[in-house]
Image (cartoon, helix red, strand yellow):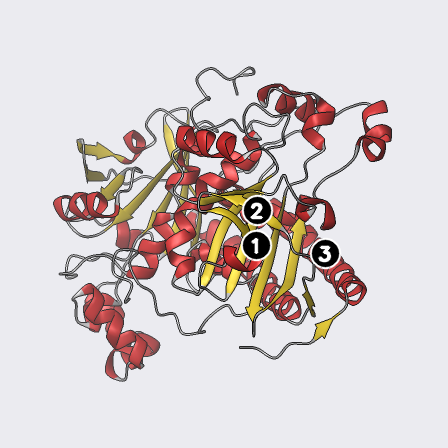
Amino acid sequence: MTEHTIGTQEQWQAQRDELLKEEKELTRRGDELAAKRSRLPWVAVEKDYRFETESGTQGLADLFDGRSQLMVYHFMFGPSYEAGCPVCCSIADTLAAQVPHLKARDTTLILASRAPLEKLIGFRKRMGWDIGWVSSGGSDFNRDIGFMHTEDELQPFLAGEIPVTVIQNAEMCGTTAGGYVAEGPGLSVYTLADGVVYRTYVSTARGLEFAMPYYALLDRTPKGRDEHPGTPIWLRRHDEYASSVAAV
Amino acid sequence: MPEHTIGTREEWQAARNELAKLEAEQAERNREVREKRLALPWVPVETQYEFDTEDGKKTLAELFDGRSQLLAYNVMFGPDYTLGACPGCTSLADGLDGALVHLNHSDITLICFSRAPIDRLAAYKQRMGWEFPYVSTYNTDFAFDFGLALTEEQAQGIPEVREMTENPPGWLEEWAGQVGADLKDGLRENPSWIAFARENGTVYHTYTVSAPDPFVAPYFSFLAERTPNKGPDEPRSFRKDEYPD
C-alpha cells in the first residue's frame, strides 16, 4: 500500500496547482527533446537486407508498403523461442491499434523478429493482433543495429547473477536465458526519399518506455507503478494472466 | 518535410548519444514528477453519484468493479453531439483496450466517461469495437463537480472559450461538423483523465489532468513524434473508420 495523506478539496487543489507547473515544465522539455530528435542526421541504409514476409521475400524499401515512413518494432522472438517475449507482447497489444492512425500519417508500422515467419504468424493469430510481422532471421538487420547478441558477447552477463525477470521471461518463451537475451527489443524508424532508405531513429531498453503506454497510465493512478527491484515483472501475455506462474 | 542533414553512421551515433543523455535526464525528471503525484492528498468523495452503465445503474464505488483503483478517461461526447464523440478522443480510446487486461491485473479498473446518454455511448462503443466499460455521466452533477464539463453559463464566462466559439479556426469548424454539435455546446466537454482510490469503503479522488497536457493525446502521437515527418501541427483528427482515401 502506498503511503498517502487524506486532505480537503482546497489542500488537494493547492498541491495540484504546484504539480501542474512541474508537469508543464516537463512538457516544455519534452517538446525541446522532440525537436532535437527530429534534427538527428539521416543515415543511408546501404545493405540489401532481405525479409521473409507474407508477400514473399522483400527488401527494406518494400516494407514501406507505398508510404514514405517505416517504423519497425523489434519484437523479441528469436529462433529458439516457442512463444514471443511477454513484455514485447504487452507493447504489441497497444501498437496494433495504432496502425490505421499511423497509416494516415504516411507511416507503416510493423513488427520484425528473427524467428521463422510461420512461427511469428502462428503466434500473431493466437494473440489476435492486426499488424504486419516480418522475419529478419535471414539477414544481419537486427545485428547491425545492436538488437542481436552473440554467445561470446553474452558470456559475462550469463556468468553473473541473472535477473529474475530474465529467468521468468525465458521460461515463458520456452528458451534459455542465453537464448532469450540474444534478442534485443527496440524501435527503428526509416524514411524513403528519392529511392534511398534512410535510418532516422533507433531506441532501445529504457528508451522504449513510450512504447509501454500502461506505464503512463499507472503513473496517474493513486498507487503508481508499485514495482519493486528484485521482484519479477508483473506483465503476462494478455491470455495468460489466469495461469500466471506468479500471480500478482 | 522538415529540414534534415544526411550523415554517416558515426555522426548519427554521436548525435544519438547526446540525445540519449537528454532522454535519460527527462526520464529522471518524469520520475520526480511521478513521486509528487503520489504525494497528492486523497480527497473523500462525499456526494452519492449514480451512473448509467451498460449493466444498469451503478454508484462510483461500484464502478471500481471490486478493484481498489479507478482510472477513467473523459471522452468529449456531450448530450448535444449528434454524430458521435470527438475524433481525437476516439483515437485516444482506440489505444486503451491494449492496456486494459494489464491494468485490470494491477488492481486498476480502466473505463471511459462521457456526458451523452448511455444508449448512444453503447452504440458508439460497438461501432468502434471497444471493450473497456463506457459509463454515462448524463443527468448527474459528476462531470460539473469534477471539472469534466462546463455549464452554459461557465462556458460563456471563459473568454478563450467564447473566442473559439465566435471566431473558430478552420480545423475547429471541421471538428464541430464531425461531432455534429454547435461549438458553444461542443466545447463544454473537457478531455481529461481522472483517478480515484477506494479504501475501507470510502472513495477518494486522487488526480485529474486535462488538455493541453500531452497525456491527453492519442497514443500514436508519441510514435509519430519519433518519425521524421510527424504531420501537421493542427489538431485535426479522424475516426479510424472515417479517414479520407
Q: Position of residue A210 (x, y in %)?
A: 56, 50
Output the chain of dot 2. Answer: A
B245 sits left or right of B5 in the view? left
**Disc 3/disc 1 C-alpha distance (Å):** 37 Å
Q: Are marks 1 and 2 in contact (CB under 8 Å)?
A: yes
Residue in the image at 70% along x and 22% along y: A164
Residue B69 badge: none
Residue in the image at 19% along x and 48% along y: B124
Q: Mark 2 belongs to which amino acid?
A: Phe
Quadrant of the image occupied by residue B78: bottom left
Output the chain of dot 1. Answer: A
Question: Helix, strand or loop at disc 1?
Answer: strand
Q: Residues within 10 Å of mark 2 (few under 14, many from 20)?
A: many
Residue denoted by label 3: B25
Task: Say which label, 1 or 2, has the lower sequence index.
Answer: 2
Q: Position of residue B125 (x, y in %)?
A: 23, 45
Q: Residues within 10 Å of mark 3 (few under 14, many from 20)?
A: few
